[in-house]
Image (cartoon, rainbow, N blue to C red):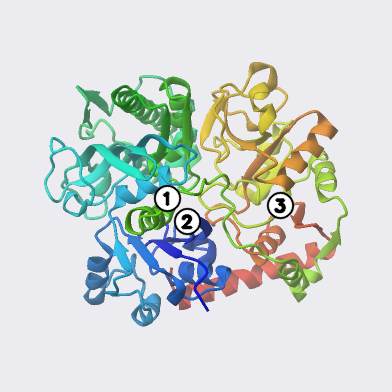
Amino acid sequence: MPKQHTYVLGLNTYDHDVSACLLRDGAIAFAIAKERITRVKHASGFYKEVIDYCLEAEGITLDDVDLIVRNCYIMPVGEMEERLVYFDAPGFLPEFERDDAAKHPLYLSHQDKVVTISHHLAHAYSAFAVSPFEEGVVMIVDGVGSYQSDVMESYPSSDTATPLARESESYYKFKGSTLECLKKVFMEPDRGFLSDEFYNMPGMGALYSRASTYIFGDWNKCGELMGLAPYGRHNQVKSLMGLTDGTLQVPHWTTDLKQPYIQDGSNWEKSPAMRHWEDLAWRVQDDTENVLLARARWLRETTGAKNLTMAGGVALNCVANGRLAREAGFDNIWIQPATGDDGIAIGCAYYGWLEILKQRRNFVMEHSYIGKPYSDADVAAALQRFLVRIQIDARRSDNVCRDTAKLLADQRVIGWFQGGSEFGPRALGNRSLLGDPRKPEMKDILNSRVKHRQAFRPFAPIVLAERMKDIFEGDADSPFMLLAKPVRPEWRDKIPAIVHVDGTARVQTVREATNPRLYQLLKEFDALTGVPVLINTSYNIKGEPIVETPRDAVACFLTTGVDHLIMHDTVVSKTAMHKIVGPLVDTYYDVTNLVSATARPA
């Protein structure tokens, strides 16, 4: 029987946000980050689970895949795996995964159909190859990319660096399937503790991570830093980054910055250093916005391009993205939803499709719902487990959007589980917690019952796409919640729960063509309240990944203060027995998780 489809598999491997993306004839079939499967946030390590997930969803085996393209930003994947054979590096390959790796056909593979590419090149393909533009430019800015010695694409000879310098920024132009690098900015290695060398390097993303570590004790809390920045006083801290004749200047920190967060069990929010941290957050955010804006304007003026695409971890900074959309001078800006390292899998797959297989672009990523769908039978099975069944009342609805809108208007917290999961770090309406934005206390309700986040962090709105301009300033569409927009003054008191302290909101626009059920829910809520907006935040608790399966959704529902769980057409509520059984189940899961963590350390 002749082979029906051409399959390309893209992989981000070993370090944080391991992921896979499977292309079927040049279109994304499925994609997943490892954290959604293992329930370990930013999961690193081996990649068996993500491959199996995509192959099983498609109903094929690895033998059916025509090409596999991989990336690991630390070093080329083949070299990484050779080193892991003789070096114990549990952060990249934990002991409990070594047997699976050793038995896997891709581990230490020398197959011709297995290819490795460099980091920013993968980011660039993830940015433009699935964009709606035939031509335009690409900005890649992240924490750290490949070594200069491992960079694959040609770039201007004037962008000199030593072999051990790392990618920090890359700028490209594209037309059709052709990509050309216009500029590379490298970071030379710096002295430091082995664990912190990267964020002492002189780069935009590295600086942001350095500030995140200083304020929160974690390099990967850049989103929290962005949320804290509007609380800071302007110009209380001297500039930490800037451009001189187009060259990035990032001076070393000095002992003037001597109030780092020490993880000693003290209450972060009550620290006497809070005022200082707020001021520093403002400074780093402002410096980042100004440098990005200058780079974007240079890119537009150099190329005359009308369309901008972006990727890399810094492109998750929706406040900076909002400024670029308003001020950089491009007609259009488009950022794919998994712009961090999970999205590397998309870029690897499309490098294979376009550059190696020499195919044409034939797919636009109009939505991020590329996880595998779960059936009504899967939902029913999750609800029929004994310890679940005795705590819930589950009823099928003839009009689930209308019924859910009524619950939301009554100030209920809703868990919303529909279709395939979103790829990327944002919940975009298939694995979401939803709430009524009309009362400011809903933010506190969500935090106290479920999210347990710092009080300064805002919640995002979803809005009917055709009503977006009525409520938020700016014309740029924002389907992936990657642009912050000012809320129009006349709406700020109508939807206070989603308005940040600076008057902005991280907007997601919803269209009927891409998510008809979420669109209908917004229409029903608008009909009831006159407000075409809902609070949308990720369906998870602090420190956990977004839920993936029906079982994940039910577990989060029963162990938090979510009022109702909507799974497909089923409305799930808690019964009086939940108050009795719930604490027992919590204890059971605590013990189970402890045993599992002991047996298989993350």
* Disc 1 and disc 2 in contact, CB within 8 angstroms: yes
Q: Residue at x 53, y 76 (%)?
A: 595
- Residue 210 visible in this rendered orientation of the protein: yes
Q: Which residue is mark 3?
A: 415
Could you give the CA–CA distance between mark 2 and mark 3, rounded to whole angstroms? 34 Å
Q: Which residue is mark 2?
A: 26
* Residue found at the very far right of the displayed protein: 398
Q: Nearer the viewer, residue 539 or 31?
A: 31
Where is residue 461? Give x, y as percent: 64, 35
* Residue found at the very far front of the displayed protein: 2
Where is residue 12? Give x, y as percent: 38, 59
From what the image shows, is residue 325 above or below residue 313?
above
Could you give the CA–CA distance between mark 1 and mark 2, rounded to whole angstroms? 8 Å
Question: Which of disc 2 and disc 1 is earlier in sequence?
Answer: 2
Dot in front, 1 or 2:
1
Picture disc at residue 360: 1
Picture disc at residue 103: none
- Going by the image, does 155 lie left or right of 458? left
Crowding near the residue tagged with mark 2, few <14, some 14–19, many ≥20 C-alpha atoms within 10 Å = many
Q: Secondary structure at mark 3?
A: strand
Instruction: Please state, as top left, top right, bottom left or bottom right, where the C terminus lies in the image.
Output: bottom left
Tell me the kind of residue under disc 1.
Arg
Q: Secondary structure at mark 2?
A: loop
- Residue 561 visible in this rendered orientation of the protein: no
Question: Which of disc 1 and disc 3 is earlier in sequence?
Answer: 1
